[in-house]
Amino acid sequence: MDTLISYAAELLILLFILLTFAFSAVEKMLDVKGQVVWLKEHMKGTFLVPIMPLLLGVLIVLDIVVSILSILAVYYLLQFQEKTMGLYSCILAAITLLLLLFGQRMAKDFQGAFTIVGYFMVVLFGVWLFSN
Protein backbone atom coordinates (compact mmCIF):
# COMPACT_ATOMS: atom_id res chain seq x y z
CA MET A 1 0.00 0.00 0.00
CA ASP A 2 2.91 2.34 0.70
CA THR A 3 4.13 1.89 -2.87
CA LEU A 4 0.73 2.93 -4.26
CA ILE A 5 0.80 6.11 -2.23
CA SER A 6 4.49 6.85 -2.82
CA TYR A 7 4.09 6.52 -6.59
CA ALA A 8 0.51 7.75 -6.99
CA ALA A 9 1.33 10.44 -9.56
CA GLU A 10 3.52 8.12 -11.63
CA LEU A 11 0.92 5.35 -11.57
CA LEU A 12 -1.88 7.71 -12.58
CA ILE A 13 0.17 9.01 -15.50
CA LEU A 14 0.96 5.46 -16.61
CA LEU A 15 -2.72 4.53 -16.44
CA PHE A 16 -3.59 7.66 -18.44
CA ILE A 17 -1.03 6.66 -21.08
CA LEU A 18 -2.26 3.07 -21.11
CA LEU A 19 -5.90 4.04 -21.58
CA THR A 20 -5.13 6.69 -24.19
CA PHE A 21 -2.83 4.60 -26.36
CA ALA A 22 -4.53 1.21 -25.93
CA PHE A 23 -7.93 2.62 -26.91
CA SER A 24 -6.31 4.43 -29.82
CA ALA A 25 -4.73 1.20 -31.07
CA VAL A 26 -7.96 -0.78 -30.74
CA GLU A 27 -10.02 1.90 -32.51
CA LYS A 28 -7.55 2.00 -35.39
CA MET A 29 -7.35 -1.80 -35.69
CA LEU A 30 -11.12 -2.26 -35.67
CA ASP A 31 -11.58 0.00 -38.71
CA VAL A 32 -8.32 0.19 -40.64
CA LYS A 33 -9.99 0.89 -44.00
CA GLY A 34 -12.19 3.61 -42.54
CA GLN A 35 -9.22 5.15 -40.78
CA VAL A 36 -7.19 5.24 -44.01
CA VAL A 37 -10.07 6.89 -45.89
CA TRP A 38 -10.58 9.47 -43.15
CA LEU A 39 -6.86 10.20 -42.83
CA LYS A 40 -6.41 10.60 -46.59
CA GLU A 41 -9.23 13.13 -46.64
CA HIS A 42 -7.92 14.87 -43.52
CA MET A 43 -4.39 15.08 -44.95
CA LYS A 44 -5.54 16.04 -48.46
CA GLY A 45 -3.03 18.33 -50.14
CA THR A 46 -0.02 17.07 -48.17
CA PHE A 47 2.83 14.83 -49.23
CA LEU A 48 1.65 12.27 -46.65
CA VAL A 49 -1.45 11.05 -48.52
CA PRO A 50 0.28 8.41 -50.69
CA ILE A 51 1.92 6.76 -47.69
CA MET A 52 -1.06 7.02 -45.34
CA PRO A 53 -1.59 3.22 -44.99
CA LEU A 54 2.06 2.85 -43.96
CA LEU A 55 1.83 5.75 -41.53
CA LEU A 56 -1.32 4.30 -39.99
CA GLY A 57 0.50 0.99 -39.51
CA VAL A 58 3.37 2.79 -37.81
CA LEU A 59 0.94 4.61 -35.50
CA ILE A 60 -0.80 1.36 -34.58
CA VAL A 61 2.53 -0.28 -33.74
CA LEU A 62 3.60 2.74 -31.67
CA ASP A 63 0.27 2.74 -29.81
CA ILE A 64 0.68 -0.96 -29.00
CA VAL A 65 4.32 -0.62 -27.89
CA VAL A 66 3.53 2.39 -25.67
CA SER A 67 0.64 0.43 -24.13
CA ILE A 68 2.84 -2.60 -23.43
CA LEU A 69 5.58 -0.40 -21.97
CA SER A 70 3.11 1.31 -19.68
CA ILE A 71 1.83 -2.06 -18.40
CA LEU A 72 5.40 -3.18 -17.78
CA ALA A 73 6.16 0.15 -16.13
CA VAL A 74 3.29 -0.28 -13.67
CA TYR A 75 4.54 -3.78 -12.84
CA TYR A 76 8.17 -2.67 -12.37
CA LEU A 77 7.12 0.32 -10.31
CA LEU A 78 4.89 -1.71 -7.98
CA GLN A 79 7.11 -4.77 -7.78
CA PHE A 80 10.62 -3.28 -7.69
CA GLN A 81 10.09 0.50 -7.26
CA GLU A 82 12.00 0.79 -10.56
CA LYS A 83 11.15 3.86 -12.70
CA THR A 84 13.17 3.23 -15.88
CA MET A 85 10.38 1.47 -17.78
CA GLY A 86 8.04 4.34 -16.93
CA LEU A 87 10.54 6.78 -18.39
CA TYR A 88 10.73 4.73 -21.60
CA SER A 89 6.95 4.60 -21.81
CA CYS A 90 6.62 8.36 -21.38
CA ILE A 91 9.39 9.13 -23.87
CA LEU A 92 7.88 6.90 -26.57
CA ALA A 93 4.43 8.34 -25.85
CA ALA A 94 5.87 11.85 -26.27
CA ILE A 95 7.52 10.93 -29.58
CA THR A 96 4.25 9.42 -30.82
CA LEU A 97 2.35 12.56 -29.85
CA LEU A 98 4.93 14.72 -31.63
CA LEU A 99 4.37 12.67 -34.79
CA LEU A 100 0.62 13.19 -34.46
CA LEU A 101 1.18 16.90 -33.85
CA PHE A 102 3.27 17.07 -37.02
CA GLY A 103 0.44 15.48 -38.98
CA GLN A 104 -2.15 17.85 -37.57
CA ARG A 105 0.01 20.85 -38.42
CA MET A 106 0.58 19.52 -41.96
CA ALA A 107 -3.19 19.18 -42.36
CA LYS A 108 -3.59 22.71 -40.99
CA ASP A 109 -5.89 21.31 -38.29
CA PHE A 110 -4.87 23.75 -35.61
CA GLN A 111 -7.68 22.75 -33.23
CA GLY A 112 -6.60 19.11 -33.49
CA ALA A 113 -2.99 20.13 -32.89
CA PHE A 114 -4.03 22.11 -29.84
CA THR A 115 -5.83 19.05 -28.43
CA ILE A 116 -2.62 17.02 -28.67
CA VAL A 117 -0.83 19.62 -26.55
CA GLY A 118 -2.91 18.63 -23.51
CA TYR A 119 -1.88 14.99 -23.86
CA PHE A 120 1.71 16.05 -24.45
CA MET A 121 1.81 18.09 -21.24
CA VAL A 122 0.71 15.09 -19.15
CA VAL A 123 3.28 12.84 -20.83
CA LEU A 124 6.02 15.45 -20.46
CA PHE A 125 5.23 15.70 -16.76
CA GLY A 126 5.61 11.92 -16.67
CA VAL A 127 9.04 12.19 -18.29
CA TRP A 128 10.02 14.69 -15.60
CA LEU A 129 8.66 12.53 -12.74
CA PHE A 130 10.30 9.34 -13.99
CA SER A 131 13.65 11.01 -14.61
CA ASN A 132 13.91 12.38 -11.06
Image: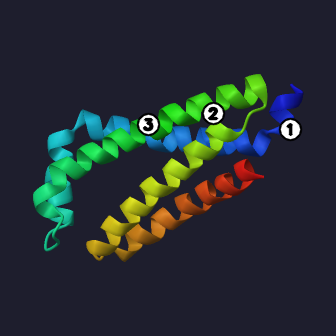
Q: CA distance from mark 3 to mark 2?
A: 12 Å
Which of the marked residues, 1 or 3, is nearer the chain's N terminus? 1
Amino acid type at image mark 1: Ser
Q: Which residue in the structure is indicated by mark 2?
A: 73
Q: Which residue in the structure is indicated by mark 1?
A: 6
Residue 47, quarter of the rendered image: bottom left
Task: Determine crowd level at label 3: few under 14, some 14-19, many 20+ residues with C-alpha closer than 10 A.
Answer: some
Task: Determine crowd level at label 1: few under 14, some 14-19, many 20+ residues with C-alpha closer than 10 A.
Answer: few
Q: CA distance from mark 1 to mark 3?
A: 26 Å
Amino acid type at image mark 3: Val
Q: Is residue 118 above or below residue 3?
A: below
- Residue 24 locus on image (x, y percent): 39, 43
Quick one: SS at disc 3?
helix
Task: Determine crowd level at label 2: few under 14, some 14-19, many 20+ residues with C-alpha closer than 10 A.
Answer: many
- Residue 115 locus on image (x, y percent): 47, 65
Quick one: SS at disc 1?
helix
Do the numbered discs 2 and 1 sit on residues whose CB atoms are within 8 Å? no
Residue 25, quarter of the rendered image: top left
Q: Which residue in the structure is indicated by mark 3?
A: 65
Which of the marked residues, 2 or 1, is nearer the chain's N terminus? 1
Q: Residue at x 33, y 39 (%)?
A: 27
Could you tell whether 117 is left or right of 45 in the image?
right
Of residues 35 and 71, the one nearer the viewer is 71
Which of the marked residues, 3 or 2, is nearer the chain's N terminus? 3
Amino acid type at image mark 2: Ala
Residue 98, quarter of the rendered image: bottom left
* Front position among marks 2 and 1: 2
- Residue 66 locus on image (x, y percent): 48, 40
